[in-house]
Image (cartoon, helix red, strand yellow):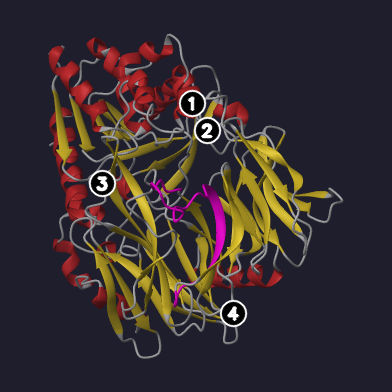
Amino acid sequence: MMRMLGALLLGVLPVAAQAQVDPAEAFGARESIQSIRLSPDARQIAYVAPSQGQGSTLYTVDLASGASRPSTRADGRGQRLDSCSWVSNARLLCLVSGMVDINGQPARATRLVALNADGSDVKQLGQRESFYQRYTSLFGGTVIDWLPGDNGAILLGQEFVPEQRVNTRLERRERGFGVVRVDTVTGATRRVEEPRLNAVEYISDGRGNVRIMGMQPPRGATGMAGNQIVYSYRLPGASEWRPLGSYDVMTREGFNPFAVDANLNAAYGLEKLNGRSALYRLALDGSGRREMLMSNEAVDVDELIRIGRSGRVVGASYATDRRYAVYFDPEIRRIAEIITRSLGGQLIIRFVDASQDESKLLVWAGRDTDPGRYYLYDKASRRLEELMLSRPQLEGVQLAAVRPITYRAADGTMVPGYLTLPPGSNGRGLPAIVMPHGGPGARDEWGFDWLAQFYANRGYAVLQPNYRGSSGYGDAWYQNNGFQSWRTAIGDVNDAGRWLVSQGIADPAKLAIVGWSYGGYAALQSEVVDPGLFKAVVAVAPVTDLATLVKDSAAFSNYRLVRSFVGTGPHLREGSPAQNVGKIKVPVLLFHGDMDLNVGINQSRIMQDRLRGAGAQSELVIYSGLDHQLEDSLARADMLRRSDAFLRKALKIQ
């Protein structure tokens, strides 16, 4: 029943009618659940679903009756509704964002808003804004502690902005990041941690006690953010801070804390072991006692598994050929096993939320051939009830299996990746796409990928390489990141194409490359390195000029970090496709949103101008009002449709 309820709420076509849906529309549709949460008493869910354009709507659903109502919405242009969570059984807290102008440059600002489940009594949390503020804060705050049992109160990490007034004592002089206790019903606040100028992080124990603080001092006199976050901790019940350690955001050296366990009086965090991130537990009793809980000899441990409103740590995970979870909590381990047996086959499970007493769990489960479904699990009855689909437009559509593979790079290194073949294909002599991921500080994983699945649906073999420069495999694999070590990264990407041909999977005359963000950069730079290997290039929101990428961050406090990440020297020119367009001889199709804050639209405009100047065949498609992710179903469908038509023409596919 609940699955049909979700379909009706989202206006999903019946399965029998879905065969008529355009594949570009079905695969390009935004995921139907942007965020979903379970009320403390487990009687309601609240979820944010996409609406027209970039818009989103918050719905609340009574789980007993199935009654649903929209609570609030945002059009996605003026404001964006990003996520909502329950602060009590009657009240929600939502993260909203919007575009602002900072010294002539667009930026996205966030705010936290509390409202009743029916959409009434809206209150913005955080410092009240005024005309006299000395600068505009882009940060609307973050929840440090949901204060389970306090019925609507939270601990809020808040930026304090000073004011400048003339001939008055009413101005606010505090500046920095502090913590306040906020009653989301009345709006009343109480100072918990005084604002500190260089504070960037506070971690509570899930019971209302702030136990860890992170400070990030600027580097030199420039005011630019430094590399080091210096952490301090408190003994239980104490007020003074003690040194805990430091963490370097560039090199990832040191202990990086993520959670505090009140029962064990210890912090969970990641720290390198033999060049790879491992999970440690560090006592917060002054003894300095530390315990290594989990590591892997091939990859980083990179994710904590947390349960409930207190964020209780119950396990951790890592990704090799696929993601594997290790549960420290025996009950949660048993529940994961029950769900896996019930749903069958290889499965990815995420514990999304829990009731106040953790008797009921909101769970997401999916796999490569299933975009995912949300379930409610009842511990007492051991009943698993399906609630909603992540991508109802694809229900009944045959999806392609994803197979982990490795291939040999030119220097003999074995590079991991994921191969997706068209459903029903024999895997021989196909039109094929190499699809490098973005980042470059990221990696691909086994599971559903809407972009790869679309191209597989259209008859292409798709290979997603985790080239050197990808994160998740430790320092030796990451090297100096995919920009400074671009020759190695792009070499691995090109060797992925050669492997497809050598295995007989790809027709060498029908081999293309498609990428988004850094992946778009890699797609373009691959042609600079090895002209003609790929017969067509599709680049979405690509970096094209490294010097411009650094220059575009000059107005922001992270400028020094960006400059250090990208580096200086000859590689800024040699590793920039816009500086080497004369080597690109194949057709190029570019897509970019003109409100992209990650990679500015000027990157694609520079590339298009220079390609045209060099006489290359190229086209730039600009989506007005869209950002880096192109969060608009119609725009994504248009991008898929155009790219497919472009590839079919360039590769001469009948």
**What kind of secondary structure does the magenta stretch mostly adopt?**
loop
Q: State how far apart marks 2 and 1 are (Cα).
A: 7 Å
Q: Are marks 3 and 2 in contact (CB under 8 Å)?
A: no
The amino acid type of the residue labelled 2 equals Ala
Q: State how far apart marks 4 and 2 are (Cα).
A: 37 Å
**Disc nearest the viewer among 4 and 2:** 2
Q: State how far apart marks 3 and 2 are (Cα).
A: 29 Å
Residues shaded magenta? 162-186
Q: Are marks 3 and 1 in contact (CB under 8 Å)?
A: no
Outermost residue to the front:
167
In this orientation, which residue lies closer to the viewer: 340 or 174?
174
Q: Identify whether 364 is placed above or below 152.
A: above
Q: Dot 2: few (<14), some (14–19), or many (≥20) neighbours within 10 Å?
A: some
Q: Determine the secondary structure under disc 3.
A: loop
Residue ID for mark 3: 630
The amino acid type of the residue labelled 4 equals Gly
**Quadrant of image for the C terminus:** top left
Please state the horizontal and vertical placement of residue 73, each as a whole percent of the image.
25, 67
Please state the horizontal and vertical placement of residue 446, each as a whole percent of the image.
47, 48
The amino acid type of the residue labelled 1 equals Arg
Q: Which mark is residue 149?
A: 4
If you read the primary sequence from the N terminus, does the residue marked by circle 1 or circle 4 appear first?
4
Residue ID for mark 1: 560
Residue ID for mark 2: 225
Q: Determine the secondary structure under disc 1.
A: helix
Please state the horizontal and vertical placement of residue 482, each as a whole percent of the image.
46, 26
